[in-house]
Image: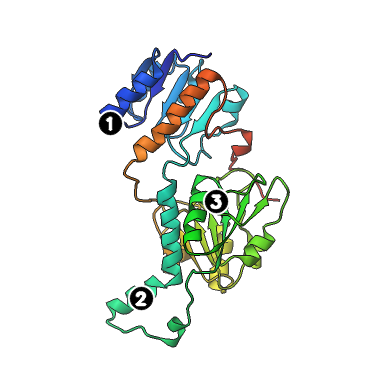
Amino acid sequence: MQEIYNALVTTYLTPENEEKLRKALEPAEVVFCKPNETEVIAEAIKKVDVAILNSDVDDLILTGPNLRWIHCCRAGLDKSAKPEIFERGIILTSSSGRSAPALAEHAMMFMLTLTYDIPQLMKAKAERRWAATREYSFKTGMYGKTVGILGLGKTGCEVARLAKMFDMKVLGWRRSTEVPENVDVVYSSDRQDSLQTLLESSDYVILCAELNDDTWHMLDKKEFDWMKPSSFVINMGRGELIDESVMIEALKHGKIAGAGLDTFEVEPLPNESPLWDMENVIITPHITPRLPDREERAMEYVYQNIEAYRKGSGFVNRLSQRNMYTKNKVKG
């Protein structure tokens, strides 16, 4: 059994949750502080073996000589999965999945908004114009259509569950060949499956994948050429999953029907981006409404991993070198 002796916690917690975490870490000596209290962190990191962080792993955290486990109470650790962590044998885990239901709702909001052309309806409302056009009457709903989900982690599986409530066919792409509940067909990167069939078949392409060296620009020119002209692209992952310039050209030339985008290659999205002026593009500022119990959901992963640390196995959301993203990657 491996015990925790000294721990640093920089995440925001209610007094009740802070006390619960303190007890879970006993008999460790625990330093609680805010993420911006660098002097406190700099002193504490000299001796801690465990760090439970509010944000990504930075250079100050990595100065800790005794670190054995780092947990980030968030998802999307493309900035934290650093080579040094794995070279030093430090365990890295996350709270990925804490907001999966809300992110899935966000994706469904994009799907419904694009399907029912809410921007045009709102424009007609502002103009006091009855928008009962022949073109609108021939639109079709989501029922019976096909959704392709790229990334079947907790958010992707939640999207699949909601899509099944609309009686949709669900195709998924992931590393492994395992077929989760609510997914009809899985295409596996470990099996070296092509995305072509999924993209050619999908009316909605939803990105829920993590960003790493294998998923960078996973939607590029070839992939957009495979898509239906009537399809919609929705990005709930990271902006760099898509070659944005290629997507803009695809939108301009009708290779896809529209996009719902919560993330971008550069954030905030620059004022000069053509995406701002496209009526078939819905933009949200990389923000999703919180779940009412998000803090508790995030901490559940911490408690599970405290037990795993002590047992030496069974970590939830453990990252490896396969999760690394190097920004200087050049796509071949």
Residue 223, placed above or below residue 135: above
Residue 240 tag number = 3
Identify which residue, 131 or 313, lies in the foreground: 313
Residue 13 place in picture, x, y as percent: 31, 31
Q: Secondary structure at mark 2?
A: helix
Q: Mark 3 and mark 2: span between their CA atoms?
A: 31 Å
Residue 143 place in picture, x, y as percent: 50, 69
Task: Determine the residue positioned at 30% across, 23% down.
Answer: 19
**For the residue marked with disc 2, what is the amino acid?**
Leu
Q: Earlier in the sequence, mark 1 or mark 2?
A: 1
Q: Find out whether the residues at labels 3 and 2 contact each other: C-beta distance under 8 Å.
A: no
Residue 161, placed above or below residue 112: above
Residue 68 place in picture, x, y as percent: 53, 19
Q: Earlier in the sequence, mark 3 or mark 1?
A: 1
For disc 2, the neighbor class at 10 Å (few under 14, some 14 to 19, many from 20) is some
Q: Mark 1 and mark 2: span between their CA atoms?
A: 42 Å
Identify which residue, 222 or 169, lies in the foreground: 169
Residue 70 place in picture, x, y as percent: 49, 26
**For the residue marked with disc 1, what is the amino acid?**
Thr
Q: Earlier in the sequence, mark 3 or mark 2?
A: 2
Residue 14 tag number = 1
